[in-house]
Amino acid sequence: MRALAALWQGAGSQLVITDTARYLLTRIDRPLERAEAELLGELAPDEAETLRSLLQRILAHATDDEAWLSTR
């Protein structure tokens, strides 16, 4: 669990992802797809897209990295 821990630094509270967490993120596609299907399974497509968009915005803000934002 420590590998996925994030550090909050400075007045801007920037989220920093460890090298180990980056590696684990490359291996998590299938488990995330299953979790997403289970979480979003009851939502209408437009509701699921709204939730996905909000989560992307939160990640972009927390990491100060716009790469999280969808280009769709």
Image (cartoon, rainbow, N blue to C red):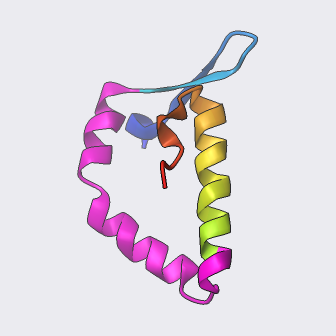
Image quadrant assignment for residue 7: top right
Q: Position of residue 67 (x, y in %)?
A: 47, 36
Q: Farthest residue in the top direction?
A: 10
Q: How far across and down, in percent of the image, does residue 58 sit?
A: 66, 44
Residue at 56%, 79% in the rendered image: 40
Q: In percent of the image, x 38 and y 36: which residue is there? A: 3
Q: Is residue 12 left or right of residue 21?
A: right
Looking at the rendering, the stretch of residues picked out in magenta corresponds to 18-47
The extreme right residue here reads 11
Question: Does the magenta run of residues contain 21?
Answer: yes
Residue 1, above or below 36: above
Residue 37 appears left or right of 28: right
Count every numbered label the image shows and give the total: 0
Say if the magenta span includes residue 53. no
Residue located at (72% from left, 16% from top): 12
Q: Nearer the viewer, residue 64 or 69?
A: 69
The relative height of residue 25 versus residue 28 in the rendered view (above or below) is above
The chief SS type of the magenta part is: helix
Vertical comparison of 52 with 26: above or below:
below
